[in-house]
Image (cartoon, rainbow, N blue to C red):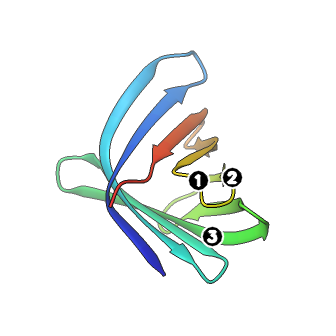
């Protein structure tokens, strides 16, 4: 799996409120993806999932009821998608950085 430990995540809530999550880690390969980030100091969230078509991933939170998707062009450095967690809904963008 390819690893991008210094990736950056921005998320937008359904009410268009932007939140800069900041750093995240992404592992991608073998038709799987894993996204790890801190949403509160010391509180880590992990979303992981399967590739359902070239560059299209469905993800679920490792803990809790979160789910979402991410899309990327072949060998692109940007992942865009949608998420739903605990009644909140929004979009997210991840820039892959090694």
Residue at disc 2, secondary structure: loop
Distance in Å between CA atoms under marks 2 and 1: 5 Å
Against 39, is 58 above or below?
Answer: below
Q: How far apart are marks 3 and 1 (CA)?
A: 18 Å
Q: Is mark 2 in CB contact (under 8 Å) with mark 1?
A: yes
Which quarter of the picture shows residue 21?
A: top left
Residue 73 drawn at (x, y percent): 69, 52
Q: Mark 1 points at which residue?
A: 76
Q: In this view, does 96 lie above or below 46?
A: above
C-alpha distance separating marks 2 and 3: 17 Å
The residue nearer to you, when weighing 30 against 68, is 30
2 or 3: tag closer to the N-terminus: 3
| 71 left or right of 63 in image | right
Which residue is under mark 3? 49
Q: State the image quarter where residue 14 is shown.
A: top right
Of 36 and 76, which appears nearest the observer? 76
Classify residue 6 as left or right of residue 85. Answer: left
Q: Which residue lies furthest to the right in this view?
A: 53
* Residue lying at 67% horizontally and 78% vertically, measured from the top left: 31
x, y percent for residue 40? 24, 45
Q: Which mark is residue 92?
A: none
Q: Which of marks 3 and 1 is nearer the N terminus?
A: 3
Looking at the image, residue 72 sits to the left or right of residue 15; the answer is: right
Q: Is residue 74 left or right of residue 77?
A: right
Q: Which secondary structure, mark 1? A: loop
């Amino acid at each position: 799996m390819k690893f991008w430990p210094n990736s950056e995540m921005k998320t937008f809530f359904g009410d268009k409120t932007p939140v800069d999550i900041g750093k995240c880690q992404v592992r991608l390969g073998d038709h799987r993806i894993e996204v790890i980030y801190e949403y509160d100091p010391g509180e880590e969230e992990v979303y992981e999932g399967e590739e359902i078509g070239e560059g299209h991933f469905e993800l679920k939170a490792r803990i809790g009821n979160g789910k979402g998707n991410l899309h990327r062009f072949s060998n692109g450095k940007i992942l865009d998608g949608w998420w739903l967690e605990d009644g909140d809904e929004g979009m997210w963008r991840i820039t892959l950085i090694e």
